[in-house]
Amino acid sequence: MGPNDHLRRRRVKRRVKVHELLATRASVDKLGARGISTREAEQLPRNHHVTTHNPREAPADAERVLLIGRTDGGRRLTLVIERTEDPSVWMIVTGWPATVGERTILGE
């Protein structure tokens, strides 16, 4: 049992189809403050990624999920995304470089 196994057990991976990500001016500013471009964020659904419930919300009621994945350049990022009326289109709320625990959830 590894030191981050408890993170994997606590966070339930969710099957979420993310075909398109939309960004607001506020989310672009939040990503930019962390050195993340919208181009990088939009790459995550096309590359290896997982979705998991947002630990700040109850899993059953979650309108937001975490999208953890890799960019084309290999950066590991975590995005908070919010459901839209179209189940395959999600709005970016914010994001950051993936933590060690989030990379563990990603399977690395």
Image (tube, rainbow, N blue to C red):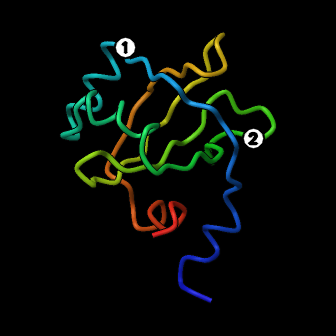
| Mark 2, secondary structure of its residue | loop
Q: Position of residue 3 (x, y in %)?
A: 53, 84
Instruction: Please tell me whether mark 1 or mark 2 is closer to you in this view.
Output: 1
Residue placed furthest toward the right? 60
* Of 61 and 1, the residue lying toward us: 1
Few, some or many residues within 10 Å of mark 2 (<14, 14–19, 20+): few
| Mark 1, secondary structure of its residue | loop
Q: Quadrant of residue 54?
A: top right
Nearest to N terminus: mark 1 or mark 2 = 1
Q: Residue at x 40, y 40 (%)?
A: 44
Return the mark for residue 58.
Answer: 2
Q: Position of residue 100 (x, y in %)?
A: 41, 67
Residue placed furthest toward the bottom? 1
Residue 18 is left or right of residue 57, and the answer is left
Specify the quadrant that holds the C terminus: bottom left
Q: Position of residue 51 (x, y in %)?
A: 59, 45
Q: CA distance from mark 1 to mark 2?
A: 25 Å
Can you identify the residue that label 1 sits on? 24
Few, some or many residues within 10 Å of mark 1 (<14, 14–19, 20+): few
Q: Quadrant of residue 59?
A: top right
Q: Residue at x 49, y 36 (%)?
A: 80
Q: Give, as a three-letter code, the residue at label 2.
A: Ala
- Is 88 located above or below residue 104 in the figure? above
Specify the quadrant that holds the N terminus: bottom right
Q: Are marks 1 and 2 in contact (CB under 8 Å)?
A: no
Return the mark for residue 49.
Answer: none
Q: Give, as a three-letter code, the residue at label 1.
A: Thr
